[in-house]
Image (tube, grey):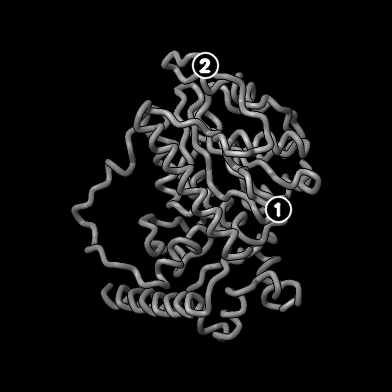
Amino acid sequence: MSNRNETTRRRHGLRVGAAVLAAAACVGIGPPGFAHEGHDHAPPPAAKEYDGSGASRWGANFFPNVTLTTQDGEQVRFFDDLVKDKVVLINLIYTRCKDSCPLATAQLRKVQQILGDRLGHDIFMYSITIDPTHDTPEVLKKYTEKFHVGPGWLFLTGSPDDIMKLRVKLGFHFQGMRDDLKDHNGAVLIGNQSTGQWVKRSLMDSPYQLAEVVGTWFTNWKLPSRIAATNYAAAPKLQLPTMGENLFRSRCTVCHTIGSGSRVVGGGEEIEKNQVRAGPDLLGVTEKRSQAWLARWLTDPGKMLEEEDPVAVELYKDYDEVIMPNFRLSEVEVHALIEFIASESRRVKEAAVADVGGK
């Protein structure tokens, strides 16, 4: 992906984000779709006069009621079955993706764990493939099994034309985007169709924050906020993270720990010993693997798998063939991340020794 294309997309994203925030500030709602100058798709039909409920403006007259197929082979209508009167999270993925999609799915898997049995009852998650010719229900089913997806989270495919209609209307495709799979929007759309509230959030946000938005704000505070109820009296003094710690927090914690069963660095949550993770615990990994190997793995894991590096292949098989994302890290970022894993491993080990000695 070129820097020029990335810059264009970021600028476009800022314009869209500003428009949505302005609309939300004025009327308390934000539409999921956006009009784009010169777009070759027909504009949406004229919306009915807003009646305050959100149902008429962002209802059946707005959303394409296309037929989609779930990972279990069940046919559903997008508006009638998936969105109408529901609180939803929607994102786009494709199973062959080696970049952001595995991380996005792991992030939402964490959101699923936080929401618990609310998912499938008052909150629903949908991941729609942008590669429908490859991502058949059978392929999607295998993908969900890799990430231990539970009830209330559907992976969906459909005809290429219908998928594009959804991408455009939901604001996931805009003029200037390439048609190849790598050029797709990595945000998550959160909405409450009955109230007309819609917002896009980055999948790099904390899973706890995403769960707070959908589980509290968008359900009219049906359940008390976990964040508001947190007691901060015993919170440690806030310190600015190093580059390596920041990278680990934002890229790695949804799949990895440093010291299984211990508090995840920067995550603020206790990890259960039997909790499913998409990757191995990294305690002491800098002592088990050479820095050169770790640097190659963090720089281009896909290439190492193609070259059939024995350790890479073993990890791939051991963790349900979940692909390690390529984060496009610079040499400086790779070094910083390795240094942080090494220093955090030392800290966890020293704390464990001190704990044993104090008993």
Q: Position of residue 159 (x, y in %)?
A: 78, 36
Q: Is residue 68 left or right of residue 207?
A: right
The answer to whether residue 245 of the structure is visible from this angle is: yes
Quarter of the image with the C terminus is bottom left
**Quadrant of the image occupied by residue 240:** bottom left
The residue identified by callout 1 is 181
Q: Which mark is residue 56?
A: 2
Q: Position of residue 282 (x, y in %)?
A: 51, 72
Going by the numbered disc 2, the residue's amino acid type is: Ser
Neighbourhood count class around disc 2 (C-alpha, 10 Å): few under 14, some 14–19, many 20 upward: some
* Marks 2 and 1, how far apart at CA: 34 Å
Q: Is residue 19 left or right of residue 105?
A: left
- Residue in the foreground of this view, choosing between 182 and 83: 182
> Furthest-front residue in view?
38
Q: Position of residue 144 (x, y in %)?
A: 67, 47
Q: Is residue 72 left or right of residue 344?
A: right
